[in-house]
Amino acid sequence: MSSGTALQASGYHGLLASKGLVENVKHFGGLFTQIAVSENGYIAIYYPYEPEIQKSAMKGTTFRPEQQERLELLHISQINSFDIECDDQTKVSGGAGGAVAGALIGGLFGFSGAGAVIGSSATSGKIKQNVNDITLVLNTKDFNNSRVEVLLYKRPPKSQLEELRQKANMITYVPYGLRSYFTHNFFTGYSFGKEGQKLLKEVYGVKNNFFLHYEPNVNQIGALESTLTQMLATQQQSEAVTPQISNADELTKFKSLLDSGIITQEEFDVKKKQLLGL
């Protein structure tokens, strides 16, 4: 987990503060998407300004904000389970029906390491195998938004020639927390400036200031997996011991209040629509 001062890109901390997420919050840095998890069960996913790319042979590449930044906020009670997908293949699942704590790195990434465990003190270093992308999938109870995908890693092209072959803009491979520092010049190539280079080292673990060597942060992915697993286990245990009141029981209770004149017909109709999802 990174320190609060390390992640200063755009309005990350400002948006967290606006939601009251200041104290007792874990910040997961070094990932493609900035994520914060609060002690009271909130998962905050930060999406900064989406840049519009403008290219010029002489002036290089510049970026300007096109889409308003936002903070997606979910509570652990809204989540049934989660998956961590590596190259579109589910490797680790957690939540109802089989929460997984301490998944093997080999199981997550297909990497035959020396038994190091995700989410434990034994986890260290970066995986060496080529992994194109790693995604956290939150399976929610919201029918209209049942699958929330959060990109944790996206492998950048290993060379500018590969980038040209893929016909991809380099900015799409830059983690959100670094995008405000990124520039590309026709003559000098890619650059993150002094502050961006500092974040590359301190948060993203790129030791040689060369972004094309950006690799998955196994420690942070493991810590996130472990945290979500523990939160889900606690939430599910709480739900198991809490008597569940069905919508039918609730509707009967409010019908009794209507018949007794305690609430109006209009109030009853509003509550009926809420309970029946109308």
Image (cartoon, helix red, strand yellow):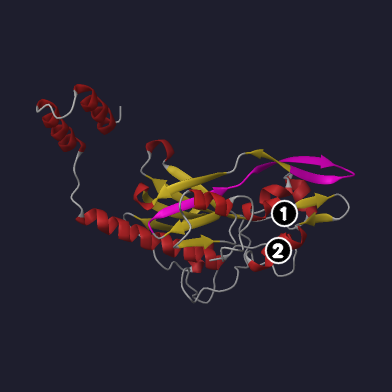
Disc 1: CA contacts within 10 A as few (<14), some (14-19) or many (>=20):
some
Near-viewer residue (115 or 240): 240
Near-viewer residue (263 or 57): 263
Report whether 58 appears left or right of 46.
Answer: right
Residue 108, x across and y down, in percent: 50, 62
Report whether 183 appears left or right of 221.
Answer: right
Asked whether disc 2 touches disc 1, contact meaning CB atoms under 8 Å apart, the reply is no
Q: Secondary structure at mark 2?
A: helix
The span picked out in magenta is 40-63
> Residue beneath label 1, please?
181
> Residue beneath label 2, please?
213
Residue 2, x across and y down, in percent: 56, 65
Q: Residue at x 26, y 59 (%)?
A: 237
Check residue 101 in the rendering and tell me which mark sits there, or answer none: none
Q: Residue at x 43, y 39 (%)?
A: 145
Tally of marks? 2
State the separation of the CA atoms marked 2 and 1. Answer: 17 Å
